Image (cartoon, grey):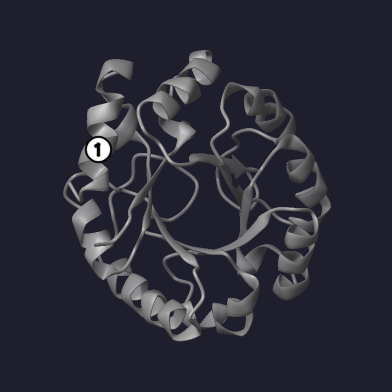
Amino acid sequence: MVCVHIAPSILASDFARLGEEIAAVAAAGADFIHIDVMDGHFVPNITIGAPVVKSLRKTTDLPFDVHLMIAPVDPFIDAFAEAGANILTVHPESGPHLHRTLQRIRAAGMKPGVALNPATPAGIIEPVLDDVDLILVMSVNPGFGGQSFIASQLRKIETVRAMIDKTGRDIMLEVDGGVDSETAPKAIAAGANVLVAGSAVFRGGPGAYADNIAALRKGG
């Protein structure tokens, strides 16, 4: 039985009540809080930065799963460590020296992650498998919430799962993009054990969050 962790993406929350939204999903059974950081350069959108992450840290003790969709990433690693990030995920395309970046993330006290865009081949992470604690397969093109799941990424999830199992290490396999009651069981069957979900968690308001999270955790 796969232990599935749910990481609500605050991109889909009510930003006017962001602290309350995080507290609500934490109380509803979330395992991580997924925070998307976009710079309007690496992806076509701008969200929040380290100061906001720092201000939100007081709202919950849950791990902050921070996904950096920015370039370059290295100058901001220490800022997100100081802000309270627990997992820091970067893209291979966001800097020239992925191995060095991952080492810097771990040295700053965070768990390093690598994100794969839909067009990024799984094999690109093989040289750094010993240096990551999380691999994120993007099942949409990054930059916006509310997109539809790209079904071809299920094969990539299967490939990455096989790569992880071969290492014998406990590396989390996360999926982000279009995760809902229909796509969650497919992602889990392919090997994912962390699901990032935005609208599928936050729809219906705080009274629905627990049921939404429970439905995703059991695979829809």
Q: Nearer the viewer, residue 89 or 152?
A: 89
In the rendered view, would you say 137 is above or below 180? below
Residue 50: image quadrant is top right
Q: Is residue 153 above or below residue 57?
A: below
In the rendered image, which quarter contains the N terminus? Answer: bottom left
Across and down, in percent, residue 219 comes to 20, 51
Residue 13 as seen in the image, left or right of residue 151: right
At label 1, which amino acid type do we have? Ala
Percent of width and height locating residue 23: 48, 21
Q: Which residue is mark 1?
A: 214
Residue 132: x and y, percent? 60, 69
Foreground residue among 36 and 201: 201
- Residue at the far front in the pictured view: 1
Vertical arrangement, residue 169 with respect to residue 140, above or below: below
Residues packed near mark 1 inside 10 Å, few (<14), some (14 to 19) or many (20 plus): some
User: For the point 63% across and 25% down, which residue is it?
Assistant: 56
Which residue is at 55% across, 19% downward? Answer: 19
- In the rendered image, the vertical position of residue 154 relative to residue 69, given as above or below: below
The answer to whether 120 appears left or right of 30 in the picture is right
Name the residue located 59 percent from the left edge and 34 percent from the top edge. Answer: 47
Seen at 70% across and 71% down, the residue is 98
Q: How many marks?
A: 1
| Residue 14 in which image quadrant | top left
User: Quick one: SS at disc 1?
Assistant: helix
Q: Position of residue 210 (x, y in %)?
A: 28, 28
Judging depth in this view, the residue of 139 and 7 nearest the camera is 7
